[in-house]
Amino acid sequence: VIVGFVGLGRMGSGMARNLLKAGHALTVFNRTQDKASPLAALGARVAEQPSGAAFSDVVITMLADDRAVEDVMFGEAGLLRAMSHHSIHVSMSTISVDLSERLTSAHREAGQTFVAAPVFGRPDMAGAAKLFIVAGGPDAAIARCQPLFDAMGQRTFSAGERPADANLIKLTGNFLIASAIESLGEAVALVRWAGVDPARYLEILTSSLFTAPIYKTYGDIIAAERYQPGGFATGLGLKDIRLALAAADAEGVPMPVASLLRDRFLTLVARGDHESDWAALAKLAAHDAGL
Amino acid sequence: VIVGFVGLGRMGSGMARNLLKAGHALTVFNRTQDKASPLAALGARVAEQPSGAAFSDVVITMLADDRAVEDVMFGEAGLLRAMSHHSIHVSMSTISVDLSERLTSAHREAGQTFVAAPVFGRPDMAGAAKLFIVAGGPDAAIARCQPLFDAMGQRTFSAGERPADANLIKLTGNFLIASAIESLGEAVALVRWAGVDPARYLEILTSSLFTAPIYKTYGDIIAAERYQPGGFATGLGLKDIRLALAAADAEGVPMPVASLLRDRFLTLVARGDHESDWAALAKLAAHDAGL
Amino acid sequence: VIVGFVGLGRMGSGMARNLLKAGHALTVFNRTQDKASPLAALGARVAEQPSGAAFSDVVITMLADDRAVEDVMFGEAGLLRAMSHHSIHVSMSTISVDLSERLTSAHREAGQTFVAAPVFGRPDMAGAAKLFIVAGGPDAAIARCQPLFDAMGQRTFSAGERPADANLIKLTGNFLIASAIESLGEAVALVRWAGVDPARYLEILTSSLFTAPIYKTYGDIIAAERYQPGGFATGLGLKDIRLALAAADAEGVPMPVASLLRDRFLTLVARGDHESDWAALAKLAAHDAGL
Amino acid sequence: VIVGFVGLGRMGSGMARNLLKAGHALTVFNRTQDKASPLAALGARVAEQPSGAAFSDVVITMLADDRAVEDVMFGEAGLLRAMSHHSIHVSMSTISVDLSERLTSAHREAGQTFVAAPVFGRPDMAGAAKLFIVAGGPDAAIARCQPLFDAMGQRTFSAGERPADANLIKLTGNFLIASAIESLGEAVALVRWAGVDPARYLEILTSSLFTAPIYKTYGDIIAAERYQPGGFATGLGLKDIRLALAAADAEGVPMPVASLLRDRFLTLVARGDHESDWAALAKLAAHDAGL
C-alpha cells in the first residue's frame, strides 16, 4: 500500500516510523519540515505541501485539532481536491464528531472513502506500536487499512460503519481518563494532608481494584508531581473535553463531571499550565487544598 | 486463634464462612439471629449478645455504619467493656476516620489493641475469599491477624501504624469507584443517544485502557441496566461519600467531584433508589438525559 | 424616524406597539404573518419579506436566537443587502458576542451602522414600555435611536462604543438571574422539607436583603409552582447560558455556576420542560429532593 | 426589661450599644474583657463569667458559632443552669438547626423559653440599628422581646413557633447571598477579560434588575477588589454553608450550588483568605481566570 502521512508531532512521528519499519512506502508532510528529516533518513519521501501526500492509496492524517485538519483538507490546495478517486482518508487525530461527519460527506461526494481511526495511547505507546485503534467506516476500507493499523497498534476495535462513532468513543474515552485523573488528584490531596504517603497509597490502589494502565500511568505522575514535560498537554485535554461537551450538547445530554473538568482545565490554562501534562489537574487539586 | 465475629450481612456472612473453612474457632453474633444459623451449621458458636463474642483473641466487626459499630462497642453492655486485656479488635467495616480514631484511643485506654482492616470487594468476592484488605495498626497485631486475613482475602496491604489511615484509604477508594461509575454513566448516556451500542462501547474501553475490574463490573451493570438487586447499595454509597467529605472537611481539602457525587446520591435516594446498586448513578445520568 | 421592525414574538409585539403609540412610522415583518395583523390595525405597514423592512432610517431586529438573526440579515435576500447606506441596524435580540462582532464588521463594510441594544425584562415589561435597554455602539447612532428606546423602555444604559459589550452584559445578566433562580430553588426545596411555608419564606427574604425584582418575580412563581405558561422559556434560558459560556470560553474564563446551570437546563429540556418558564430550575430542584 | 448580653464581637458590640441607648439595663459578658469597656462606659454592668449575665429577664447570645454557644450554655458553669425559671434565652447567633433544636429542648426541660432570632445585616447595619431579625419561638416570648428587637433592628419577621425554622431561614439566606457573590464574581471575571469596566457593569445591573442591597454591597467590594478588612469573614461563610448543607443532608435535599460554594470557601481558606471578606469568592474567580 502506498501511504501518505500528514502530521509528524509526538504521536505521528512514532506512527510513521512504524509504518516504514513494516515496509510501507511513505510520503510524509509536516508543517515544520525539520520533523520530517529523521523519517527521510529511514526512506520516506518528503512532500513540500499537504497535497504532495495525496498520490497514495491511503492518506493518514494525525494532527493536533479540528483547525489543523481543516487547513490541510479543505481549500484550493487542500488534500481533498488532490486525492484521487477510490483513495481512502484515515483520520487518526482526535477531532470533533461534527468535523468527522463533514469529512464523511465531503469524501463521499468526491468519490473517496473516509475512515476515522483515532487512537488511545501516549507518545511512548505510539513509538512502541502499542496503540489501541478505534476504527469507524466501511468494512471494506477498514479491512484494506488493517495492515497499516497492525503496524502502528496492538489492537484495532471496530466502531461500526459510521466514522463519527469512532470519534465519539475516543472523545468520551479521554473524558473518562480526565475524570479518573481529577478524582485521583482530589484523593491524593486528601491523603497527603492526612499524612499518608502518596506512593504507598497509589501502590495499594493499583494493586487491587484500580489495575488499569491509566491509574498506573497517572498515579506515578501524580505521586512524583512530575507534570513537565507533558506526554499529553493540558491544552489538548481542554480541547477534548470541549469536543465531548459539544457532542453531548448536540445530543442534549448533561455531563456534570465533564463540565467540571472543562472549568478545571480552563483554570490550569489561565494559570500558565497550557503545556503541562494534563495530569496537572492533580496539581490544581493540591494547590486548591493549600498544599 | 479464637475469633469473635460480629455482623453477618452480605459481606460478613461470606467472610465468617471462610474463617470457619480455614479451621478457626468462631463465635458469631448478628442482630437478627436467623443470619447466624447457616454458620452454626458449619460449627460456629452463636452468641446472644455482642459481648458474647468478646471472649476471643481477636474480635472482628463487619457492620453497616458508624452507628452500628458504636452500638455494639460502647455502653454498659458493649464489647469494649467485655473484651479482655491484650485482645485485638479488628474493625473491617467501612467507618469514619473520626470513629476509627476514637476506637484507637478507647482500646488503648482499655489495654486492648485496635486494628482497622477495611476491605475492597463486593459480596461475591467476600464469598470467594478474594477480598483486598487494607490493614492499619501495630505491626505485631497485624501479624497476629494475618492468618485470618489470609482466610478472607487474596491480599493484605499495610496502611502503616495508624488505623485511621486504613479507613481513609478505603473511603477515598470508594470515592474513586463512585467517580468512575458516575463518569461511565455520563459517557454511556451520550453514546446511547448517538446510537452506539453500550455493550460494544464498554467492550472497547475495558479491552484497552480501562482494564481494571471496576470498569468491567460496573460497565456490565450499566450496559445491562441491571440495578436490582444491589451488590452495594446506593444508601451505603451515600454514606461513604459523606465520610470521605467529612474527612476532607476536617483537613480543609476541597473535593469537587466528591461534592457532586454526594448530590447525585442524595437525588437517587430521594427518588427511591436507596436499595439499588450504587451503579444507579448511571441510571440517573440516563434519566437526566431523557433516556 | 422611519422604523423597520423584524420579529413579533412575545417581546417584539409589545415593543412594536409602543413604538406605534409614540407616533413612529413602522414597517413590521414576522415569519408567521398572523402576528402582524394586530399591529397593522394600529397603523403599521406589513412587509412580506424581511427586506421589506429595510427602507427605513433604523431597522430593529428582535428575534429568538443567532440563527434567526443570521437568516434575516445575511444571504441574497437578506436585510444587510437591502438596507441603505447610513441606516442603522439595532439588534435588540439576545445574541452571541460572536455574531454581534460579525454584524459590526458586516455593517461597517456596507457603510451602515450597527448598534446592539439588548433588553432586560419579561413580556409584561415589554408591553408596559418598562424594559431596561443596554445599548452599545457609536454615540451618535445611539443618540439617534434614543427616542425609540424611550418609547420601549424605562431606562437606557450605555455599554460604550463596542456593540458586543452590550451583548456580553445582557448574557451575563441572564446568567445572574438564572443563578438566583437555581439557588432559590435549592433553598425552597430545603425549607419545604423542613415544614416552612415557601410563601412566608420568600416574603421574609424579599422584604429584607433580597428586594430586587428578580427575587420577587421568581419567588412568586416558585412559591406557587406556576411554571406554565412560561414568560421566558427554559429553551431560551439554555440558549443564553450556552452563549455566556461560549463568550467565557473564548476569553478563557471558568464559570462553574454557569456550567452547572447549563447541565440543569439540559436536564429540564431532556425531560420535556422546553417550553416551561426557566424558573422550572426550581421544579427540578424540588424533584431531585423527592418533593 | 433586664437584659444579659453575651458576645461582643463586631456584631454584638453594636447591638448591645443600641440596647443601652434605648434605655435597657444591660449586663454584658465577653470572653476577652477589653471588648466590654466601651459598653461599661455607657452604663453596662460587666460580668466576669457568662453566668454573670444570667440574672435577667432575657439573655441574648451573639456568638461566632455552635461551639461558642455550647461553651457558654452547657456545663456546670453554663448559662442554662444559672438562668432562672421563666427567663428567655434569645439566640441571635447564626447557629445550626441541630443546636437550635437541642437548645429548645434543654430550655423547655429547665422551665425556660428559647427564642431563635438570627439577624441579616453586616456590622455597619448592626451599629445603625438596621438589622433584619427573623424570630422563631412562642408568640408570647417574641412579643416580650419585641422592644429589644426594635432597639436593634429595622424590622422583625416571624418564623413561627419553632425556633429552628428561624435558623434555617437565616442559613439559607446566607447561602443565597454567597451564591449571588459567587455568580457576580464569575460574571465580573468574564467582563473584565472582555475589557468592560466592572464599575460601569455593576452600575448597570444594580440600577435595573439587581437593585437589592446585596448586589450593591458586594458589587462595590468586587469592583474595588477591597477584600480586607472583612465585614463578614470567609471563615464564617464557610461555617454557614456547612450548616446549610448539614440541614439539607438531614432532610435528604441535594444542593449543588451550596456544594460548589463549600468547595470554593475551602479553597479560599486553604490559600490564606480565612479572614478576608467572604466576597473574596470573586477574588478566587478572578484568580482562576488568570486575572
Image (tube, coloured by chain):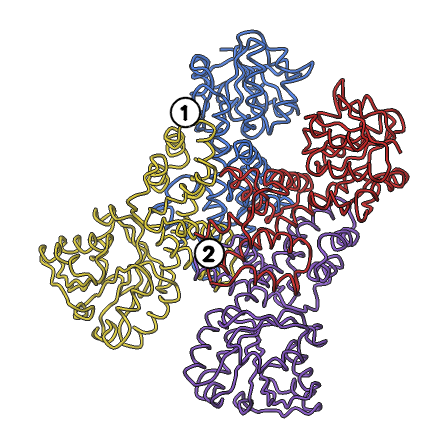
Chain colours: A yellow, B blue, C purple, D red
Quadrant of res D234: top right
Counting from the top left corner in percent of width and height, residue D215 is at 64, 55
- Give the mark count: 2
Disc 1 crowd rating (10 Å Cα; few below 14, some 14-19, many 20+) is some
Q: Which residue is mark 1?
A: B157
Chain letter of disc 1? B
Q: Give the amino acid at mark 1.
A: Phe
Give whichever of D151, C83 is nearer the camera: D151
Give whichever of C267, D37 is nearer the camera: D37
Disc 2 crowd rating (10 Å Cα; few below 14, some 14-19, many 20+) is many
Give whichever of C278, D4 is nearer the camera: D4
Residue B195 appears in the figure: no
- Helix, strand or loop at label 2? It is loop
Identity of the residue furthest to the front in this view: D41
Relative to A142, B62 lies left or right: right
Residue C139 appears in the figure: yes
Q: Is residue C170 above or below residue C52?
A: above
Residue at position x 27%, y 50% in the image: A131
Residue at position x 56%, y 55% in the image: D223
Q: Give the amino acid at mark 2.
A: Val
Relative to B268, A159 lies left or right: left
Counting from the top left corner in percent of width and height, residue A78 is at 24, 73
Q: Quadrant of the N terminus of chain C?
A: bottom right
- Helix, strand or loop at label 1? It is strand
Label drawn at residue C253: 2
Q: Are marks 1 and 2 on the same chain?
A: no
Q: Tell me how far mark 1 sits from mark 2, CA to CA.
A: 43 Å
